[in-house]
Image (cartoon, grey):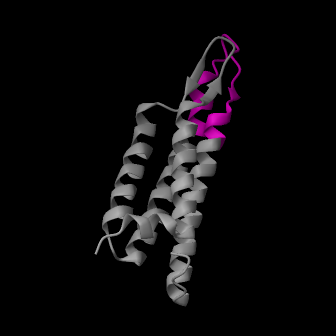
Amino acid sequence: MFSIKWRVKSKIARIYLSSILITLMGFLLPWIHTHDRSGSGLYPINGVIALLILVSLIVFFTVKNKMLVSIVMIITGVLSFLIVFYTFFSSLVVFINPFISSFVSYGIGIFVTALGTLGIIIAGIVGIKVRNNDNSDLI
């Protein structure tokens, strides 16, 4: 039988869900500052992160196979982190123009989002390790 209460009460689920909240908060914070503008994480490529998180949440709350849920967590976290990493380095090319000498400073949002995605990866790895050790009180 499907039980949301069981899934939310486990320690790995708390790490996973709090990491998702941290990632989503990072979207709303500024990622990039220039001398005349600021940009949040709501770029079209970062919508892929939101889509990955949505799919991961659906799998988390509907699939009973704990190993599959942990693997989906890891895949979601790794792909999301790679998108953040790509955005971090590609913004240098977009926002620095040598002719007008516009300088870029990174906002807190890109680091908060990266931290959230790393938390998702950690929750998935711990879920797999716990599953291999058959210690079911954590997941």
Q: For residue 123: magenta?
A: no
The residue lying toward the viewer, choosing from 76 and 60, is 60
49 lies above or below 129: above
Question: Hey, which residue is sitting farthest left in the picture?
Answer: 1
Q: Residue 68, position in %: x, y?
A: 38, 73
Q: For residue 101: magenta?
A: yes
Q: Residue 129, position in %: x, y?
A: 56, 81
Q: What residue appears at the point 42 percent right and 43 percent down from the top-left corner?
A: 50
The residue lying toward the viewer, choosing from 36 and 134, is 134
Q: What residue appears at the point 51 percent right and 67 percent down from the top-left corner?
A: 9
Q: Is residue 85 visible?
A: no
Q: Residue 5, position in %: x, y?
A: 42, 65
Magenta-drawn segment: 87-111
Quarter containing the N terminus: bottom left
Q: Is residue 67 left or right of residue 77?
A: left
34 lies above or below 15: above
**Which of the 4 quarters of the picture holds residue 38?**
top right
68 lies above or below 133: above
